[in-house]
Amino acid sequence: WFHGHFDGSPVLPGFVQLVELVLAPARRRWPDLAFLRKVKRLKFRRTIGPGEPLRIRIERASDAPRVDFEIASTTNGIPAQSTNALSS
């Protein structure tokens, strides 16, 4: 995923963060979640580099059709990305 993003300073693309780090695990945990239709208040706070250890928090309030998440570095705890709603 880092190849081509960007020469000399590779980063994990935001789309990959959403699909692979958030949506895939959320659908495994809650199979009733449909396809993503809306993203509210998404904030990319900083880039994620190769080999960076991450903590990913994904929560869902009861059977709500949405999840909240945060991706943060486990080294310094600084969030890389967060949102309060991914809705189906």
Image: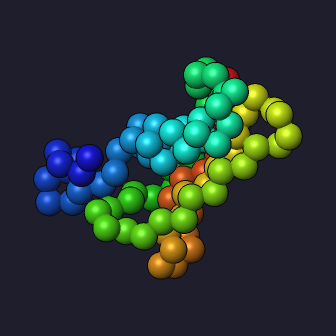
Left or right of 12, for residue 77: right
Residue at x 56%, y 74% (from the top left corner)? 77
Residue at x 31%, y 67% (from the top left corner)? 51
In the rendered view, tell whether residue 19 sits above or below residue 46.
above
- Specify the color scheme: rainbow
For this orientation, the residue located farthest to the left is: 7
Residue 52 placement: quadrant: bottom left
For this orientation, the residue located farthest to the right is: 62
Residue 20 placement: quadrant: top left
In the rendered view, tell whether residue 68 sits above or below residue 48.
above
Left or right of 22, for residue 16: left
User: x, y (%) of residue 75?
Assistant: 47, 79
Residue 36 placement: quadrant: top right
User: x, y (%) of residue 88?
Assistant: 67, 24
User: x, y (%) of residue 76?
Assistant: 51, 78
Q: How many marks?
A: 0
| Any part of residue 87 in sight | no
Left or right of 14, for residue 65: right
Residue at x 59%, y 35% (from the top left corner)? 27
In front of the other: 13 or 55: 55
User: x, y (%) of residue 59?
Assistant: 72, 49
Residue at x 54%, y 38% (from the top left corner)? 23
In front of the other: 66 or 77: 66
| Any part of residue 30 in sight | yes
